[in-house]
Every structure is written in structure tokens, then in C-alpha cells.
Image (spheres, grey):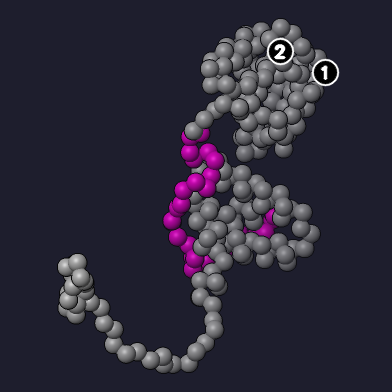
């Protein structure tokens, strides 16, 4: 068979599709997919897709929120639910809450990962517009010189570098008393300002943390620390 112009159209056996007669059978039910009962594999996928530093951030956040829960029953229930996501997460939170560390509940455990979830696992495509705080000290002039050298290095990428020290001097943009860690996209501690005379109080897990700095009164006084 063909059209008037001679172009062939489908015939049975040549591109022609037939379907046998079909009838509905069985009891019609309105139900939801069994996957709706799975509340744990998706959070595990999210956690697996983070780099270790981001995972630690998440653990710290869960510890902070659950530490404000007064009921020991609720705390224990939180650990139970976390254990269905990850035994590692559950145990690390349980230790902070003084709750018994659970045994693995592996029903929904998997090692799958996805992309574009975390921030640290992927290099930034562009740097322009970011603000970097460089922590320096007027007691160590070399730290201020280093900070300004970094400023020059980042200038071509349109990165704003702010040099922070105890007081204003040449090359210093802000004082510790007027600065806050949340105002910066990144923090660099210059050589000579990292641990001189015990300025920095490290946390129990060995990290510096983030948040407001304790402000020194003047050069030679208590060194600025980072608190969380």
C-alpha cells in the first residue's frame, strides 16, 4: 500500500503493529509504593555523598540539636532512627548524648553515592566575589606581609582579601573586635599568628571550629581564639 505520491506506508508485517485484545482482571486497589515505607535509604545516600569534613559538620549539627532535647526517651528514639541510616552516625551521636551505642540495623544500609550534594567535594568553578579573611598579628609583622602577598595573588581572580589583626596598622583591614567568622567564605591563618603564646584554643576533636573570635585587649595580651 502506498500514498498517491508513491511513499509506502506501514503494512502488516512491515512496521504495522497489532495488539491482542486485553481485559483488566484482578481486584482494583489504590495503594502506595512500598518505597514510601523506606525513610532511611535516601538520607544514607545523602550522607554517603558528603566528604568526611562535611559529614563531621552534619554530626556536629545533630549533636547540637539533640543535646537540647530533655527527654531521655526521645533522645534514645533519635539514636534508633539514626541507626537505621548509619550505625556510624548513630554511635557518634549516642556518645555525645550519653545514650547506649546501638548495634547495626543494616536493613537499609547501602554504599551508593550521588553527585552535587556537598560543597567541599567539588572544586569551585569560579572564585570571583568570594571574601577571604586572613588572620594575622601586629606582633608578627611577617604575618601581615604574608597576608598582603596573598591579597596580591588573589587579585587577578577578583577575590576580596581582608587582613584581620588586633589593631589597625599598615596592611590591616579589620580588627578582631569588629570581625566575625561568618563574614568570610574562607579563613587563612598566616604564619606567626597560628599558635603564638597559645592564642588558639583547639577543641577536643583537634579542629579550630568556627564562630565568634574572643577578642584580645591589645598586642601581647590574650591571643584571639575561635569558639563554637
Q: Is residue 3 magenta?
A: no
Front position in the image: 86 or 46: 46
Secondary structure state at the residue bearing disc 1:
loop
Front position in the image: 197 or 34: 34
Query: Please, is residue 211 above or below residue 138 in the view?
Result: below
Q: Are marks 1 and 2 in contact (CB under 8 Å)?
A: no
Residue 149 is tagged as none
Query: Please, is residue 95 above or below residue 9 in the view?
Result: above
Magenta stretch, main secondary structure, is loop
In the picture, measured across the screen, residue 10 lies left or right of residue 42, that is: left
- Residue 212, given in percent of the width and then of the height, sits at 75, 32
Front position in the image: 197 or 48: 48
Q: Which residue is found at the position 52% from the left and 30% from the top?
A: 126
Identity of the residue furthest to the front in this view = 4
In the picture, measured across the screen, residue 228 lies left or right of residue 192, that is: right
- Whole-angstrom CA distance, mark 1 to mark 2, is 17 Å
Q: Which residue is found at the position 56% from the left and 43% from the top?
A: 54
Front position in the image: 6 or 203: 6
Quadrant placement of the N terminus = bottom left
Q: Which mark is nearer the camera, 1 or 2?
A: 2
- Residue 190, given in percent of the width and then of the height, sits at 61, 18
Secondary structure state at the residue bearing disc 2:
loop
Q: Which residue is found at the position 56% from the left and 46% from the top?
A: 55
In the picture of the structure, the residue carrying the numbered disc 2 is: 172
Q: Which residues are magenta?
A: 96-124
Quadrant placement of the C terminus = top right
In the picture of the structure, the residue carrying the numbered disc 1 is: 217
- Residue 93, given in percent of the width and then of the height, sits at 64, 53
Query: Please, is residue 72 above or below residue 64 in the view?
Result: below
Q: Is residue 97 magenta?
A: yes
Amino acid at each position: 500500500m502506498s500514498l498517491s505520491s508513491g511513499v509506502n506506508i506501514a503494512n502488516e508485517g512491515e512496521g504495522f503493529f497489532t495488539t491482542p485484545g486485553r481485559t483488566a482482571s484482578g481486584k482494583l486497589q489504590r495503594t502506595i509504593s512500598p518505597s514510601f515505607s523506606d525513610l532511611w535509604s535516601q538520607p544514607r545516600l545523602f550522607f554517603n555523598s558528603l566528604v568526611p569534613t562535611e559529614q563531621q559538620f552534619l554530626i556536629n549539627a545533630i549533636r547540637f540539636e539533640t543535646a537540647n532535647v530533655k527527654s531521655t526517651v526521645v533522645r534514645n528514639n533519635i539514636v534508633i532512627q539514626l541507626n537505621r541510616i548509619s550505625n556510624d552516625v548513630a554511635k557518634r551521636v549516642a556518645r555525645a548524648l550519653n545514650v547506649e551505642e546501638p548495634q547495626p540495623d543494616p536493613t537499609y544500609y547501602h554504599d551508593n553515592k550521588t553527585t552535587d550534594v556537598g560543597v567541599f567535594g567539588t572544586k569551585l568553578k569560579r572564585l570571583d566575589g568570594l571574601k577571604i579573611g586572613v588572620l594575622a598579628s601586629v606582633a608578627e609583622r611577617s604575618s601581615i606581609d604574608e597576608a598582603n602577598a596573598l591579597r596580591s595573588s588573589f587579585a587577578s581572580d577578583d577575590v576580596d582579601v581582608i587582613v584581620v589583626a588586633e589593631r589597625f596598622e599598615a596592611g590591616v583591614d579589620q580588627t578582631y573586635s569588629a570581625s566575625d567568622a561568618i563574614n568570610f567564605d574562607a579563613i587563612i591563618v598566616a604564619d606567626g599568628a597560628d599558635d603564638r603564646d597559645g592564642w588558639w584554643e583547639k577543641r577536643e576533636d583537634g579542629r579550630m571550629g568556627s564562630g565568634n573570635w574572643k577578642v584580645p585587649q591589645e598586642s601581647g595580651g590574650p591571643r584571639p581564639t575561635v569558639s563554637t
